[in-house]
Every structure is written in C-alpha cells, then in structure tokens.
Image: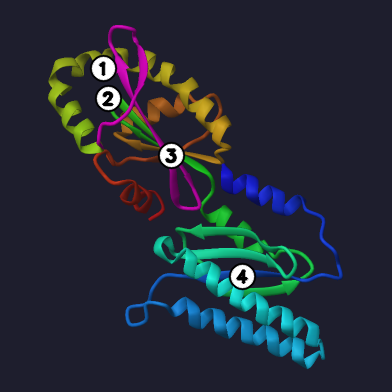
Amino acid sequence: MKFQENLSRLKERTYSPEQNLLTVYLNTEPERKQQTSWKLHLKNGMSRLTEYARAEGASDQEKQLSKLHKLLESTIENHRGDLKRGIVLVVCPEEGVLFLEKLQVPSPNAFYWQSEPELEELETMFRQYPAAGIVLVGSDSVTVVDTMLGEVEREWNYAWDSESEDWKQYQGIAASSRTASSATHKEQFGKRVDANRQRWLKRLSPILERHKKRNSWQEIVLAGESGLTNDLAKELNGNKPRILSKNLNGMTPNQVLQEVYA
C-alpha cells in the first residue's frame, strides 16, 4: 500500500513546465561477470541526456544533470545492500528524490528528462504484475499472500477451528510445519472436510473479500487441489479468480510467485 500511496502522490503533484525532472528506470540485477553493471547503465544513460542538452545549448541543464548523476549514484549506493532486480527513481534538481521504488521484476534501462515524471514503463509493469492476492487452499488451512509487482507484501495464515466452526487466523508457524500438521490430521477429518466443504468455503469467502478491498487487489489467484479451488471460486460473489491447480503449500513465497507468474 505504501508504494501505491507514494505513486498517487507523485501523480497528483503539480509540476512546472519550466522545470525538468529526471525519471530513471534501472536494471540492478548483477551480471555474471560484472557485479555493478547498473553503474555503467547509469553512466551511459546520463551521458546521452547530457549530450542532448549540450547540443541544444542548454548549459544550465548540463550542470543540473551532472549534479543529479552524482545524487543518483550515491542514492543507489546507499541501497546497495537490498537492491533487487530493478529500481525506479524520480528526482528533481531543487527537491532531490521525489520517488524511489526497488523492484522484484525485470526493469528496462530508460532515462527521461522532461517536465513531468514518465510512468509508462511502470504502468506496463503494473499490468503484467498487478496487485494480487494469492490464496493457497488446503483442506483445513489457508494461506493468503498479498503481492504487488511480483513481490510479497504480507502473508496471513488461517486454520479451520472445529470448536467455533469458523476460520481463525494464526501466526508464527512455518509453511513446512503447516504442511506436516495438515498431513498428520488428514485421515482424522478427511471425510468431514468433504461433507462440510461448501459451508467451510462459504465462511472463507468474506475473509477474502475483505482482503481484496483493503489491499486493492486487481486479481485473486487460487492455488490448490482442483476440487477445492473450483468450489471456492463459486463462492467469491462475482469475482472471477485465476485458478492454479497446483499444491504450493510448503514452498517459499518467492517459489510461489515463480509458479504463479511462470
């Protein structure tokens, strides 16, 4: 949500047509033989912008671009320990960094020097990797994963409580433990699950609806045994989810994302 809020503020700002901004999309994935290849991409991109400014006789813009090049390099260096696959920055000569987002999805190397931020590439990434909820459906447990731009934001775990006859949220149990627990109890209430499946899934639907509204999901992905996922899809009040008939329980969040966006 913080990313969406920052992006909304960027879009809502008023910009002066007389003041250029620098928008930079940078691939920060280390190459096999060159761990800091982003520095070369940054240098080349900024050099091209500087050449354009020089050709137009805009010496003031040359100075601004030189200053911003140093600012960008130091800013990215400060985040070097947690760089991902890409980074997007919008910087202003007078105000500094207006927007910075590290990405877990492939990013182009693109540089724009104009009066407003250039967000077309970012919008394209949103269409490819929308805000989505990935729901790992088990017979008695469910994991809800909030994702955006191919990265896990948060995770919630639920288990069916036989005493209250409802889903309860729990924390602090690893995916492998959940899988083992589910296997241990499988024979104990397997028949009961099948007999009460529709009622159990109907109770799960409003939980997912609340997550969808709160996290502005554009897509819901249901992963699990086809019978469970298809039955749950029917309970989602007109929301047509994407169904992945695979059991992803026990996988790490990154492995889950790779399966979903394969």
* Residue 24 numbered mark, or none: 4
Residue matched to label 1: 193
Residue matched to label 3: 154
Q: What stretch is highlighted in magenta?
A: 146-174
Q: In this view, does 17 lie to the left or right of 143?
A: right
- Whichever of labels 3 and 2 marks the residue nearer the N terminus, that label is 2
- Whichever of labels 1 and 3 marks the residue nearer the N terminus, that label is 3
Q: In this view, does 102 lie to the left or right of 120?
A: left
Q: Nearer the viewer, residue 170 or 226?
A: 170
Cα distance, mark 3 to mark 2?
22 Å
Q: Nearer the viewer, residue 228 or 92?
A: 92
Cα distance, mark 4 to mark 2?
46 Å
* Residue 77 numbered mark, or none: none
- In the image, is residue 123 part of the stretch drawn in magenta? no
Q: Is residue 81 left or right of residue 68?
A: left
Secondary structure, mark 4, is strand
Cα distance, mark 4 to mark 1?
52 Å
Q: Mark 2 packing: few (<14 Cα in 10 Å), some, or many (20+)?
A: some
Q: Which of marks 1 and 3 is in front?
A: 3
Q: Residue at x 27, y 13 (%)?
A: 195
Residue type for callout 1:
Val
Residue type for callout 4:
Val
Cα distance, mark 1 to mark 3?
28 Å
Q: Mark 1 packing: few (<14 Cα in 10 Å), some, or many (20+)?
A: some
Q: Which of marks 3 and 2 is in front?
A: 3
Q: Nearer the viewer, residue 16 or 206?
A: 16
Cα distance, mark 4 to mark 3?
27 Å
- Whichever of labels 4 and 3 marks the residue nearer the N terminus, that label is 4
Q: Mark 4 packing: few (<14 Cα in 10 Å), some, or many (20+)?
A: many
Where residue 120 appears, x then y in whole percent?
66, 63
Q: Quadrant of the N terminus?
A: top right
- Whichever of labels 4 and 1 marks the residue nearer the N terminus, that label is 4
